[in-house]
């Protein structure tokens, strides 16, 4: 597969570049009008070159890419203008709506609020309150009042972590801490939009798990992989899955959506497989998948996966072939246009890099190995997917987490089949929860599988050299590694030596830059 043939990817890359440049420049408040004044003539030039037919294809491609670059910069700039806020210097009374359940911290609770009122309507802030009984009186959708001075925390001068920019990228405009006298619930009236309703429904489903007999670590794991509810995961579970290279199993992602996609087709009656009714089957699949995204709180990984599978379902319903890479790039375009700041979410980047690497490198790796049995083919496919995913995410994982799990392939070979069974059983549990004996049996099997998975991961972590401590200290090295990976793929796929020369040129440039940095 040639990357140059993927039209959506060729548009997503300049859009991402514009967002990155806009973030580097910063929100000065002056570039919006400049970007608009430049974008209009560039779009006009792209339209004129397109209207000339095939006479100026390169010129049209250049202006179209430049248009998406400028659009990315403009969208991110407008997003940041809506987040960055000048707060009053004195103590002021505010009103807001709680958008999620209170999040417990070491010495306080964090309330995620969306402010109301004519001046600060829609601004998100983090309100930190003491640990007392008043916290349990508020639930998502509750109206809250508080008095205080809203501000943004300063960056950590020791670690260099820019916490202010991190919160801005999350859409949070300010934080403050108040004691019990300066905050409270306004009334018993509840409000909220779709996301708040989704949060309430997900919490109610979690409580059903508890009523049906799940508890402790099995409850935390099942809730995380089926509902995206991670608040019950303790530090020991997170550390275990991270050290073994299985953190992706805790995040509701493309794996879980793919399992649900296959599960839905298995449940459909045979008459929906007829060609005349194929559109009805795909419509039901799309509706159920978006309902699943709604119930899980609509995280980035789920939205990306649901958009991808929705595009595939639409192509199948209309009888057209779909390019997986194009579909992935289209999902990225949709999500970045809707929320350009999601590019800086580590889950977004890891999710897209992993899937793109699987689509590109997976077939190449699987083609190297051959098997004569179905089990052998299954193992080869699982191994190729695991290796490809690690190729795409390794630079970012090492840069962000300063370490790499050595036995990632063994982890995936043993844990993914168990995770497939757990997700399928959790769906079966909801489908047949009204049959008490069957429900009890499924709960017992889920507990067994959860304990079995924990035992396997503990054994893998206990193996010698289960984790390599390595770090990448500069962001430009991450980009260099991805450049090398892309050109190596192009060399393997197209068999053209110039791509290998480009990859080796990046290696040589890396060496030269590192040398001058070391002597400087």
Image (tube, rainbow, N blue to C red):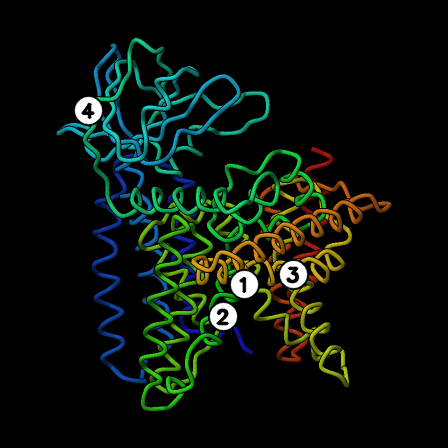
Q: Please tell me the numbered disc located at residue 187.
A: 4
Q: Residue at x 53, y 20 (%)?
A: 106
Closer to the camera: disc 3 or disc 1?
1
Most distant residue in the front direction = 437
- Within 10 Å of the Cα at label 3, are there few (<14), some (14-19), or many (20+) other Cα atoms? some
Image quadrant assignment for residue 84:
top left
- Report the mark closest to the observer, 3 or 4: 4
Horizontal and vertical percent position of residue 482: 60, 57
Q: Secondary structure at mark 3?
A: helix
Nearest the viewer among 35 and 411 is 411
**Label at residue 416:** 3
159 above or below 89?
Answer: below
Residue furthest to the left in view is 118
Q: Residue at x 84, y 47 (%)?
A: 463
User: Residue 141 has which mark?
Assistant: none
| Nearest the eye: 70 or 331 | 331
Does dot 1 land on a helix, a strand or a loop? Answer: helix
Q: Which residue is mark 1?
A: 424
Residue found at x 49% / y 58% = 429
Q: Is disc 2 in contact with disc 3, using a CB cutoff of under 8 Å? A: no
Residue 187 occupies quadrant: top left
Residue at mark 2 = 263
Callout in the foreground (2, 3)? 2
The residue positioned 59% from the left and 71% from the top of the image is 360
């Amino acid at each position: 597969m040639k990357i140059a043939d993927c039209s959506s990817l060729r548009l997503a890359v300049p859009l991402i570049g514009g967002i990155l440049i806009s973030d580097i420049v910063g929100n000065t408040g002056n570039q919006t009008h400049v970007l608009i004044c430049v974008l209009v003539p560039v779009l006009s030039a792209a339209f004129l070159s397109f209207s000339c037919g095939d006479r100026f294809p390169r010129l049209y491609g250049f202006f179209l890419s430049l248009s998406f670059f400028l659009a990315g910069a403009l969208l991110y700039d407008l997003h940041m203008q809506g987040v960055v806020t000048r707060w009053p210097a004195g103590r002021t009374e505010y009103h807001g709506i709680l958008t999620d359940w209170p999040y417990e911290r070491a010495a306080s609770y964090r309330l995620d609020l969306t402010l109301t009122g004519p001046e600060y309507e829609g601004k998100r802030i983090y309100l930190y309150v003491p640990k007392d009984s008043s916290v349990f009186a508020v639930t998502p959708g509750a109206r809250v009042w508080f008095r205080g001075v809203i501000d943004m925390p300063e960056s950590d001068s020791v670690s260099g972590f820019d916490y202010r920019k991190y919160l801005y990228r999350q859409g949070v405009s300010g934080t403050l801490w108040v004691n019990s006298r300066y905050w409270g619930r306004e009334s018993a009236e509840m409000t909220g939009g779709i996301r708040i309703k989704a949060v309430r429904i997900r919490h109610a489903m979690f409580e059903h798990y508890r009523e049906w007999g799940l508890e402790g670590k099995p409850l935390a794991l099942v809730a995380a992989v089926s509902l995206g509810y991670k608040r019950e995961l303790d530090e020991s579970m997170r550390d275990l899955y991270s050290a073994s290279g299985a953190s992706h199993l805790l995040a509701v992602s493309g794996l879980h959506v793919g399992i649900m996609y296959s599960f839905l087709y298995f449940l459909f009656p045979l008459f929906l497989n007829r060609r005349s009714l194929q559109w009805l089957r795909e419509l039901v699949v799309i509706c159920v998948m978006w309902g699943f995204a709604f119930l899980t709180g609509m995280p980035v990984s789920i939205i990306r996966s649901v958009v991808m599978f929705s595009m595939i379902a639409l192509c199948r319903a209309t009888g057209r072939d779909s390019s997986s890479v194009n579909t992935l790039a289209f999902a990225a375009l949709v999500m970045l246009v809707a929320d350009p700041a999601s590019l800086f979410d580590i889950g977004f980047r890891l999710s897209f890099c992993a899937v793109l690497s699987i689509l590109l490198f997976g077939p190449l790796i699987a083609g190297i190995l051959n098997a004569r049995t179905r089990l052998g083919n299954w193992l080869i496919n699982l191994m190729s997917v695991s290796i490809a995913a690690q190729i795409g995410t390794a630079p970012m994982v090492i840069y962000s987490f300063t370490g790499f799990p050595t036995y990632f392939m063994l982890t995936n070979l043993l844990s993914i089949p168990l995770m497939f069974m757990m997700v399928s059983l959790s769906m079966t549990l909801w489908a047949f929860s009204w049959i008490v004996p069957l429900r009890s049996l499924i709960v017992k099997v889920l507990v067994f599988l959860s304990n079995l998975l924990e035992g396997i991961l503990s054994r893998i972590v206990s193996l010698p050299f289960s984790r390599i401590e390595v770090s990448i200290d500069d962001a430009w090295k991450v980009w260099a590694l991805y450049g090398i990976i892309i050109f190596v793929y192009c060399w393997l796929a197209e068999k053209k030596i110039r791509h290998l020369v480009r990859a080796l040129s990046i290696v040589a440039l890396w060496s030269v830059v590192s040398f001058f940095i070391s002597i400087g």
